[in-house]
Every structure is written in C-alpha cells, then in structure tokens.
Image (cartoon, grey):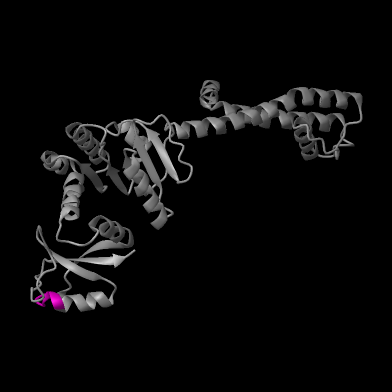
Amino acid sequence: MNERLLKLLYYRLPNILKLLLLVLITIPIFGYLIYLIEPERFPTIIDGIWWALITGATVGYGDYVPASLLGRLLAAFLILSGGGLIAFYIASLSTTAIKREKKSQEGKLAFHGENHYIFIGFNERTRQLVDLIIHHYSNKKIVIIDQTLNNLAYTKLPVHYIKGNATEDAILNMANIKAASCVFVSADNQKPDYESDTYTILATIAIRGNHPSVPIISEILSKKQIDNAARAGATTIIRSNDFMSSLFFHELDPEIKATPFEDIHHLLIQQKFIHQSVPHSLIGKTYLEAVTPFLKKGFLVIGILREKDYIFQPKATCILEEKDILISLSKR
C-alpha cells in the first residue's frame, strides 16, 4: 500500500476517527518513552502505556509516577499535549452525538433497519396509526417520510423521520425501501383531491420501481384516480371518501338505532379481518355448515368473496364453491 493511498484513506476518515487514531498513536509513544527513561519504575511497556493514558486523561491514579527530572518533564508535556488531545476527542464525540440527534429530528439521517413499515405523509391519521401499531406490535420499526415538517420530535414512539419527497429515489433509499415490509401512502387533505391523488400515484410508482414486491397501501380521494393507482402498482387502494360517505349515510339513517361509527371503530381495534380459502372438506356444503367449525377455531364467518363479489350474511342454504374465499373476524 503506497503513501498516496494511505493519505487518501486518512483524509476520507471522519474527523472523530482521525482524532481517535491520533490518540491511539500518541499514547503508546509516550508510554514507550517513559519506559526507556525510567525502566525501574515502569518495568514493562504496558505499564508505560497505562501511565500515559491515565496521565493524558488527567485522571492521575498515582500507581505509576516518574521520579527523574526528564520523566517529569515528559509527564508535563504529555499533560499539555495529550490531555488536550483526549479532551478534544471527548468533546468532539459529544458534538457528534448532538449533531446526529439534531439530524435525526430534522429528517436528514438515513434508516438502516429491515422489515419496517414506511408511512408517507404525517398527519393525525398517521399518528393514530402509529399508536395502534406500537400498541399491538411493539417491536415493529416505523419510518415516516414527509416533506412539510421542519422537524419531528416524536420521542414517545420509536419512529424514524425522513424529510423529503417520496417520489424521489434518493429519499426512498434513505428509508431503505428495498428492505421494507409494507408502505402506506397517506392522502394529503390539505391539498385539492386531484393534487393529493397525483402525488400518491407518483409516490406509488417510485416505490414500486424500487421494490417490485412490497405491499403498497395507497389512499385515494377521487374515484377517477382509482384505476391509475392500481396501474401504478398499489396493492390495496383505500377510498377514504367512499368509506366516509357510506358511514355518514348509516349515521343519518333514521330507521336504525345504533352508533355505526363507534361500532366499526371498536370492531377494527379489537378484531381483524381474515380471508381464508374454503377447505376442501366444505366444498359443496352450505354456509350454515361452515360457520360452526370455524367458530370453534375462533373465527366468525361473516361473508363470502366470490371472484370480485362480496356476499355478506348469505343465506344459510348458500352452497360453497371451490374458489370461494371466506371472510371472517378474529380477535387480535
């Protein structure tokens, strides 16, 4: 390895590592010198290095002390030079930690974990979603990408914030998109529906291009953009406006005496939907005959997915077909 290559490697090192390297070189030199000057007090080079480290750090245990004038002069020089060097290294280490924390809050730090969720867009829905995930899956790692926040001091929840535009490959790579297990693209209700959906679709395209197999949940506000979101590569399309309109319709129905919003809210928190293929033993059986064995296993069958048709609360005599999917509820 030639001198030019060594210099190149040295200049590419971070300042904190350069300081550490300087400390690791300086201390053994002083340890060797005191060993040469006073071998009777410092019987081994290791003893000399230990004395140099303790003296340079200005700790001064007193287990090894130079007695000669030359040894004391060396100790004084070590305190003036090595002590300042170690103090500067410790100060630099603290500064680096503070800068790293600041960068983390400002969204300038890349994420290096794996099997994590990525949420694009930070709003009240995202905050509540993070709360639910932490409550039910406390070990799940979460990365939030948002371009509107100056910083995200979210200390209560283990989230990693990245500031930037999720349609850019560089920002997605900072979130380690290739190792993500799922991505949720939230709609921006502060923008017009068309503008919000356009950003969601562009982000979906960028995500799919970087990770062809990752599940992408995209929130779309306008019906006209649903097909475009599907073509962009969204695995699941959340139609917020459709859902809320249907919910409002139930709330306004004068014939029902219930609380649809509260019912659905608590249902989704306490239960989870399960899609299961019809077991071979139940093909040709009635819906009623399928309910009991599933109920014994902890699944409440509420409907059938037949191709693209959802059939909820089918007739008891409804015959199950080979390609049917049973929709059931199960406790979390």
Asked whether 248 falls inside the magenta stretch, the response is no
Residue 9 located left or right of residue 123: right
Q: Nearer the viewer, residue 258 or 78?
A: 258
Q: Nearer the viewer, residue 159 or 52?
A: 159
- Residue 10 in view: yes
Asked whether 284 falls inside the magenta stretch, the response is yes
Quadrant occupied by the C terminus = bottom left
Q: Nearer the viewer, residue 111 or 317?
A: 317
In the image, which residues are magenta? 283-288
Question: Where is residue 299 shown, x and y percent of the image?
Answer: 26, 71
Find residue 290 and report its image quarter.
bottom left
Find residue 138 and report its image quarter.
bottom left
- Residue 213 in view: no
Residue at left 23%, top 37%? 200
Residue at left 23%, top 39%? 204
Find residue 72 and report its image quarter.
top right
Seen in the picture, residue 7 relative to 127 is either above or below; the reply is above
